[in-house]
């Protein structure tokens, strides 16, 4: 499907890659249709789904929703196709199994409009159970604090964003950054946010109410890969091999940031190993992370991780085991 150049460009393009998400994408699209900011388009790319995803999209015949189809090529390729078709002044990447708060676009747009020099705006989000829906209580709320301004150094240490659904980006910055790297199967969004942060500052959305509700699915890439050290390697090579980073930060500073990033990755791997039932391996990773990058908060968390066998499940916090 090609652009209708006779139609005025919308303010915001919402780009939704979709693969076998018939169970969830209706909720995502309904949250877009419920926005109090009406000047949007949604570009859905069905990435070779086999479960009727396209039928769920077609059942919502709003002209602002466009459906594209491609043979299965992965989320990066689907996002890049949607980017090529987007017409909006700003872009938001919404995962097909998540949903937006009704005022998400208006709050994001107001924050970005108030900062003409900013590349993007972002704000609070909530993690939800896999079978949750609008109105259900969150598993966990991330309401801040969020760094603003030049966030490049923060991003190099860790991915600040749950995903692109609570992040509104200026179209020109997205075009300058180019497509997602199709060969990355994990961390592809993190690498992309860093390319955007090289271009300029970010602003944050006021308030603590979530913009985005992130569904924690057992089949997600994070669930499948975040406990595997090898999964981080391709993204790390792509990120720290970017010559623009050395030009901006200098070689020695970049090396120091990479060491901190590796310590952060070790913490994530350790936490996820524990959540997958591999407690001893996970504790070893947590200890190595804390040794490389000491933190009082993480020292307390490590103590809690050691005490998990005697703690009731409600107190397991970030180490709570996955169901099943």
Image (cartoon, helix red, strand yellow):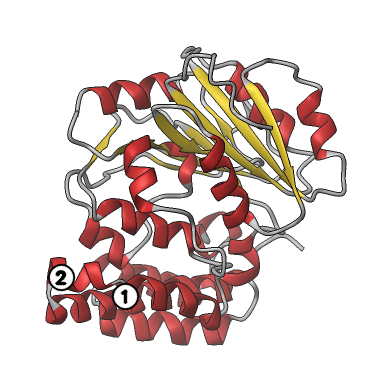
The residue at which mark 2 appears reads as: 247
In-front residue for pair 71/57: 71
- Residue 90 located left or right of residue 75: left
Circle 2: element type = helix
Picture residue at 13% right of the left edge, 82% below the top: 252
The residue at which mark 1 appears reads as: 240
Extreme residue toward the front, this view: 6
Nearer the observer: mark 2 or 1; the answer is 2
Picture residue at 75% right of the left edge, 56% below the top: 72
* Above or below 121: residue 72: below
Residue 309: tell me if it is visible. Answer: no
In-front residue for pair 302/310: 302
**Real-space Cα separation, disc 2 to disc 1, in angstroms:** 12 Å
Quadrant hosting residue 125: top left
* Above or below 221: residue 65: above
x and y percentages locating residue 267 in the rendered image:
41, 74
x and y percentages locating residue 207 in the rendered image:
31, 27
Residue 229: tell me if it is visible. Answer: yes
x and y percentages locating residue 178 in the rendered image:
41, 53
x and y percentages locating residue 232 in the rendered image:
48, 75
- Residue 93 located left or right of residue 122: right
- Residue 249 located left or right of residue 104: left
Extreme residue toward the right, this view: 51
């Amino acid at each position: 499907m090609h652009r209708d150049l006779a139609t005025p460009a919308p303010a915001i393009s919402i780009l939704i890659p979709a693969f076998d998400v018939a169970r969830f994408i209706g909720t995502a699209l309904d949250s877009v249709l419920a926005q109090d900011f009406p000047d949007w388009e949604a570009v859905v790319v069905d990435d070779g789904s086999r479960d009727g995803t396209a039928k769920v999209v077609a059942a919502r015949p709003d002209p602002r929703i466009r459906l594209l189809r491609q043979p299965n090529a992965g989320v990066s390729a689907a996002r890049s196709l949607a980017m090529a078709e987007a017409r909006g002044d700003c872009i938001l990447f919404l995962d097909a199994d998540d949903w937006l708060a009704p005022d998400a676009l208006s709050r994001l747009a107001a924050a970005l409009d108030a900062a003409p020099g900013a590349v993007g705006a972002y704000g609070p989000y909530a993690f939800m159970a896999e079978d949750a829906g609008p109105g259900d209580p969150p598993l966990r709320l991330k309401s801040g604090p969020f760094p603003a301004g030049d966030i490049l150094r923060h991003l190099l240490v860790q991915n600040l964003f749950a995903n692109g659904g609570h992040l509104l980006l200026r179209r020109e910055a997205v075009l300058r950054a180019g497509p997602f790297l199709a060969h990355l199967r994990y961390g592809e969004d993190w690498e992309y946010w860093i390319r955007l942060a090289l271009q300029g500052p970010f602003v944050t959305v006021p308030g603590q109410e979530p913009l985005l509700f992130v569904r924690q699915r057992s089949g997600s890439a994070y669930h499948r890969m975040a406990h595997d050290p090898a999964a981080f390697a391709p993204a790390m090579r792509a990120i720290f091999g970017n010559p623009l980073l050395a030009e901006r930060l200098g070689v020695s500073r970049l090396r120091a940031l990479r060491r901190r990033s590796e310590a952060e990755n070790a913490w994530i791997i350790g936490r996820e190993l524990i959540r997958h039932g591999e407690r001893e391996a996970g504790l070893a990773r947590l200890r190595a992370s804390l040794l490389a990058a000491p933190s009082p908060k993480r020292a307390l968390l490590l103590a809690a991780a050691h005490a998990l066998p005697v703690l009731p499940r409600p107190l397991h916090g970030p180490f709570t085991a996955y169901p099943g």
